[in-house]
Image (cartoon, grey):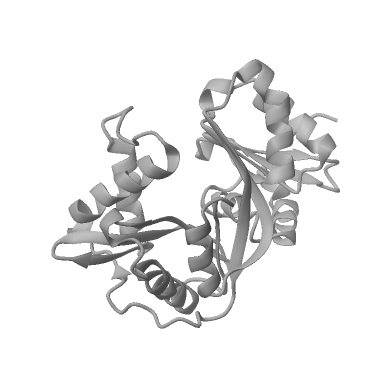
Amino acid sequence: MPARPLGVAERPAVERLLDLDPIAAAPVAERVRMTGLGWWRTEGRVLGYGPRRRLEALCWLGTNVIPVAAGPAAVAAFAEAAGENPRGCTSLVGPSDAVLGLWDRLAPAWGPAREIRTVQPLLATHAPPGVTPDPGVRLVRGSELDLLYPAAVAMYTEEVGVSPVQDDGGRGYRERVTELVRARRAYAKIVGGRVIFKAELAVVTRHTAQVQGVWVAPDWRGRGLGTTAMAAVVADALGRVAPSVSLYVNDFNLAARRVYGRCGFRRVGTFATVLR
C-alpha cells in the first residue's frame, strides 16, 4: 500500500492519531494546527498510510522528515515517497525505529549522512521542578534580539555542526529567532549585556511545550546555571503554555541529562536524528 497525501477532510483522523502519542507527535501536531492539511498552505506535506477509514501512520515530508506511529510497512511506504525529493530534506527526526528504518531505505540513493544520532532519550515532565528556578531567566524582549541572536548562532553551530548563516547570510535563521521572541517562546539570562543562557519552546501543542536550543555560555558551564535556568523555563512553560514540557537529548550528553533529571524530566520514548 503506498503512502498518500492527506486532505482537509481527513483532519479528524489525523488528530486522533496524533493524540495517541502526543509527546512524540508534537512537532507534526503543531504543523497541522498552524497550517492545516492543505498542501498549498505550507512548505511540506502530511502523508498518510492506511485505509481512509483507518489511518495507521503519518509522516511530515518537508525540510524535515518526521514519522508518526510508523511501523515497518508504513516506513517502507514513506521512504518510497520521500525518495522522490532528496534535495528538499535536511534531516530526519522522530521515533528511533521509524527514523532509522527510513534511513536504511533512503541512504543508498541519498548518499551518506553527515551525522546519525541513533539514541536520543525523549523526556517529559508534568510537575513543577523540585529545583528553585533562577529568577534571572525570563522571556526575551523584542529589543534584545541583537543580544540573543549571536548566542542562538553559537548554540546551533555547536549542536548541529554547521553554521546557520552559511547559506543565506543568516536571514532565515534570524527570522526564526525573531518569531520565537515575538511568540514569547524565547528565554534567556542576560548578564552584563550578554546572553549566558538561552532556551526556546520550539514546538507548542495543547499537550506539551517542547524545549530546544538549550545553551549555556562556555565560560559559565559547570557552575549549576543550567539546572536552575532550566527549572525557570519549566516553571514558566507549565504555568503559562502547556500541561507538560518535553525535549529530546543525545544519550552521550550526560551533563545535560543530569540537568534534566534534576528538573523532573523522565524518559517517555527514544528519538533518532539523521543530519544530511
Q: Does 52 appear above or below 146? A: above
Give the camera-side residue of 46 and 224: 224
Number of callouts in the render? 0
Q: Does 20 appear above or below 62? A: below
Give the camera-side residue of 16 and 142: 142
Q: Residue at x 59, y 52 (%)?
A: 251
Q: How far from the left and from the top, in percent, is residue 65?
A: 60, 37
**Quadrant placement of the N terminus:** top right
Q: How far from the left and from the top, in percent, is residue 131?
A: 45, 81
Q: Is residue 71 visible?
A: yes
Q: Is residue 200 found left or right of 117 in the rendered image?
A: left
Q: How far from the left and from the top, in percent, is residue 155?
A: 35, 48
Q: How far from the left and from the top, in percent, is residue 90?
A: 51, 31
Residue at the front extreme of this rendering: 222
Q: Residue at x 68, y 18 (%)?
A: 108
Q: Quadrant of residue 104?
A: top right
Q: Is residue 46 found left or right of 165 in the rendered image?
A: right
Q: Quadrant of residue 243?
A: bottom right
Q: Is residue 6 visible?
A: no
Q: Is residue 198 found left or right of 80 in the rendered image?
A: left
Q: Does 34 appear above or below 167? A: below
Q: Residue at x 60, y 49 (%)?
A: 28
Q: Residue at x 74, y 43 (%)?
A: 97
Residue at the left extreme of this rendering: 192
